[in-house]
Image (cartoon, grey):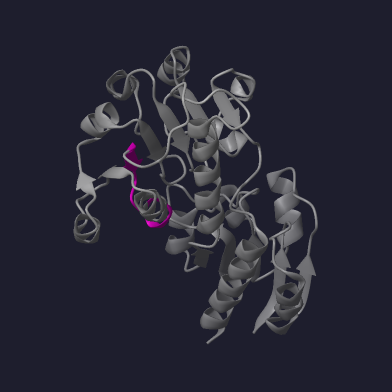
Amino acid sequence: MFQKLVAIEPVSLIPEAEKKLYGYAHEVTIYNDVPATDEEIINRIGDADAVLLSYTSRINRFVLERCPNIRYIGMCCSLYSPESANVDIRYAEEHGITVTGIRDYGDEGVVEYVLSELVRCLHGFGEEAWDGMAREITGLKVGIVGLGKSGGMIADAMKFFGADITYFARSEKKEATRKGYRFLPLKELLSESEVVFCCLNKNTILLHKAEFDALGNKKILFNTGLSPAWDETPFTKWLESDNLCFCDTLGALGNEKLLHHPHVRCMQVSTGRTRQAFDRLSEKVLANLSEYNG
């Protein structure tokens, strides 16, 4: 059991799970607002040996150096790699601090979002149909950039509706091949696809000028990541042609000035934050705490 556990910001646990936090430490403090500065984070942590946070705050080296009692950090959000994490994982590893995160808790909502928006676009619900006439997903050439959990789920959903699936990933995946998905180099995928889904880890940028040149005109681009998958200058230029980009959040779009661009559809809602996602998140956060405590 921890001596003191602090949730430095809202961590999106369901009420039943939040109550269970009190069984993991002698003293538990839960803050209901997001700290504005590193100094405020340090003050909230104090002498705590366990800390919880979501994706809206950062625990960097500066903070960790000033909170020497920390031995456990629970990220109540996705943890894919040290580079994309909002905790200084390298420092934590060097100083024996365990950092846990969670994965695969909000993907179902994201899949429903992209299906909903694509169907509306192709059929012309609320605006003119993309091709000038209502069209099905059947036969649509779909490219998936990043075939992780969410990318794989989007690919499966598109296949169910009859799309022709190609994908780009760090390596070719046997399971994807068995499903009939074709692995292509990135530029070739971009050139062939009518609709492209970027499903990448945070801070991963794969689309530069050469990639947008390959993508070309009259294309639909979805970004389901937490940050832009592109360099802004070539992306902005690409938008000026007859193209369309969908993002659920401003974080995925990157620049607030693009929110009202006529070729951008940004809902400014995290589509993975559903009732069921909070249930899954809560279960995984508590499971991590239980595993650490043995």
Q: As drawn, is 179 to the left or to the right of 144?
A: left
* Residue occupying image coordinates x 54% and y 20%: 263
Looking at the rendered structure, the number of numbered marks drawn on it comes to 0
* Residue occupying image coordinates x 72% and y 47%: 39
* Residue 121 horizontal/vertical position (percent): 52, 32
- In the picture shown, does residue 72 fall above or below 195? below
- In the picture shown, does residue 65 fall above or below 71? above
Q: Nearer the viewer, residue 280 or 71?
A: 280
* Residue 27 horizontal/vertical position (percent): 77, 77
Q: Which residues are magenta?
A: 140-151
Q: As drawn, is 248 to the left or to the right of 152?
A: right
Q: Is residue 142 magenta?
A: yes
Q: As drawn, is 234 to the left or to the right of 58?
A: left
* Residue occupying image coordinates x 54% and y 53%: 87
Which quadrant is home to the N terminus? bottom right
* Residue 28 horizontal/vertical position (percent): 76, 74
* Residue occupying image coordinates x 33% and y 44%: 163
Q: Nearer the viewer, residue 173 or 226?
A: 173
Q: Is residue 167 magenta?
A: no
- In the picture shown, does residue 62 fall above or below 76? above
Quarter occupied by residue 191: top left
* Residue 40 horizontal/vertical position (percent): 75, 49
Quarter occupied by residue 9: bottom right
Q: As drawn, is 75 to the left or to the right of 92?
A: right
Q: Can you see residue 184? A: yes
- In the picture shown, does residue 217 fall above or below 26? above
Q: Can you see residue 205? A: no
